[in-house]
């Protein structure tokens, strides 16, 4: 009786570890927040700015990020400008973190059939976060902020990385501008 309970517990733990692994490897987390009472209908133009002290990527990745955001904001009716009289100032920052990912393997068997072993190994994965901020330049106030976090595979091609970035920005800006309540 005790042996079958131990097998059941091992199988349950293996299943839980497998589910957690699936959630970690496929997760793309996106959140956004806006200043209450902001009338977003008054914003028609925007200018890219650098956030002081923010971590910036190399020029290639910078261009890819801006291009992806530009295309999404264009679908929202906003126009990019280099003028200091832009309605919005937009900046971003990025971070990369290393996290552990647990991979589980079950060698067969199971509760009814007996036998089998479950093992778990860990690997390091890279998780990238991009924070996009929008400021109203006249009161110098943050009016919207969004964050996209995704597991990054460094071995992906440049095209695949751009495709993932475009999906993340589309998801991040899906509900922009926020609806007035």
Image: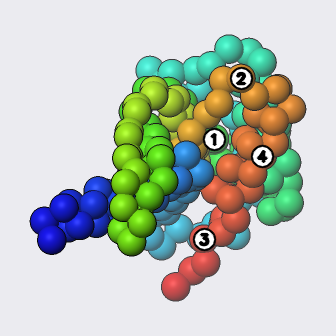
Q: Which residue is the site of mark 2?
A: 155
- Left/right placement of residue 18 relative to residue 138 reads left
Q: Tag 4's secondary structure? A: helix
Q: Nearer the viewer, mark 3 or mark 2?
A: 2
* Pointer 3 or 4: first along the chain: 4
Q: Nearer the viewer, mark 3 or mark 4?
A: 4
Dot 3 and dot 4 residues touching (CB under 8 Å)? no
* Pointer 4 or 2: first along the chain: 2
The quadrant holding residue 3 is bottom left
Crowding at mark 3 (Cα within 10 Å: few <14, some 14-19, many 20+): some
Label 1, label 3: how many angstroms apart (C-alpha)? Answer: 16 Å
Viewer-proximal residue among 121 and 31: 121
Q: Tag 2's secondary structure? A: loop
Q: Nearer the viewer, mark 4 or mark 2?
A: 2
Label 3, label 4: how many angstroms apart (C-alpha)? Answer: 20 Å
Crowding at mark 2 (Cα within 10 Å: few <14, some 14-19, many 20+): few
Q: Which mark is residue 90?
A: 1
Residue 177, given in percent of the width and then of the height, sits at 66, 67
Q: Which residue is the site of mark 4?
A: 166
Q: Which residue is the site of mark 3?
A: 178
Dot 1 and dot 4 residues touching (CB under 8 Å)? no
Label 1, label 4: how many angstroms apart (C-alpha)? Answer: 17 Å
């Amino acid at each position: 009786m005790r042996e079958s309970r131990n097998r059941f517990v091992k199988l349950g733990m293996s299943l839980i570890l497998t589910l957690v692994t699936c959630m970690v490897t496929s997760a793309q987390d996106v959140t956004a927040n806006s200043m209450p009472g902001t009338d977003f209908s008054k914003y028609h133009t925007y200018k890219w700015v650098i956030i002081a002290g923010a971590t910036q990527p190399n020029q290639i990745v910078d261009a890819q990020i801006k291009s992806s955001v530009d295309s999404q904001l264009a679908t929202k009716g906003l126009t990019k400008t280099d003028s200091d009289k832009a309605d919005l100032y937009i900046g971003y920052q990025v971070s990369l973190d290393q996290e552990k990912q647990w991979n589980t393997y079950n060698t067969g068997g199971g509760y009814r059939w007996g036998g089998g072993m479950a093992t778990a190994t860990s690997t390091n994965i890279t998780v990238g976060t991009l924070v996009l901020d929008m400021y109203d330049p006249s009161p110098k106030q943050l009016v919207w902020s969004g964050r996209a976090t995704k597991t990054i595979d460094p071995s992906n091609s440049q095209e695949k990385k751009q495709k993932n970035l475009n999906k993340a920005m589309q998801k991040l800006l899906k509900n922009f501008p926020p609806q007035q309540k």
